[in-house]
Image: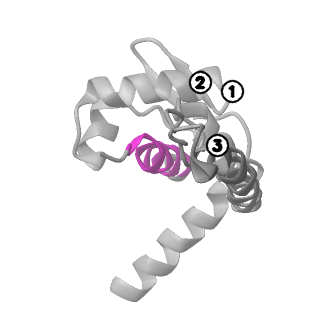
Amino acid sequence: MYSTKYSVSIHILSLIALKKEQAITSDYIAGSVNTNPALVRRLMSALKRAGLIKSQTKIGVMGLTRQPDEISLLQIFKAVEKEQRLFAIHTDTNHNCPVGASIGNVLEYINQQVQSGFEKELDSIHLSDIINGLHMNEQITG
């Protein structure tokens, strides 16, 4: 099962960015995401702890703490995903087997390279890129 916290958080931040400092509630956001407002509130809490949004209890989200081009997808990912590693390695191998004795070290090295590339790529993409994509899609479909 895959986590959708990251994509839902991008959805939330995109809505906030497009509302331009208007207070919006978790109920409104949940309607757009088509999910439970409690999930939205949990994600907004994580985004607030990460310093990405401004909010007030009973009022809602008051906006982003910085411009969309200053918020990378890596910041969003790290704010909401508990398991930030892409791959886990099985550890209960037979150390008497030549493959079982070494596979963990080999895979760990490769996984670190992949993880580093993944994080570098996410760090190069910003919320503004998502918003620009939304505007482009709107022009195409509208």
Local SS, label 2: helix
User: Mark 3 vs mark 2: which is more N-terminal?
Assistant: 2
Mark 1 — residue?
Answer: 51
Q: Distance from label 2 to label 1 (Cα)?
A: 5 Å
Numbered label attached to residue 101: 3
Q: Is 41 placed above or below 114 here? A: above
How many residues crowd around disc 2 within 10 Å: few (fewer than 14), some, or many (20 or more)?
A: some
Mark 2 — residue?
Answer: 48
Q: Distance from label 3 to label 2 (Cα)?
A: 44 Å
Numbered label attached to residue 128: none
SS assignment for the magenta stretch, majority: helix
Q: In the rendered image, which quarter contains the C terminus?
A: bottom left
Residue at 52% across, 38% down: 94
Marks 2 and 1 close (CB-CB < 8 Å): yes
Residue type at numbered disc 3: Ala
Residue type at numbered disc 1: Gly
User: Mark 3 vs mark 1: which is more N-terminal?
Assistant: 1
Residue at 45% across, 29% down: 43
Local SS, label 3: helix
| Residue found at the very far top of the displayed protein | 57
Residue type at numbered disc 2: Lys
In-image side of 132 versus 92 (left or right): right
Magenta range: 3-17
In the rendering, at what x and y percent does residue 11 appear?
A: 44, 50
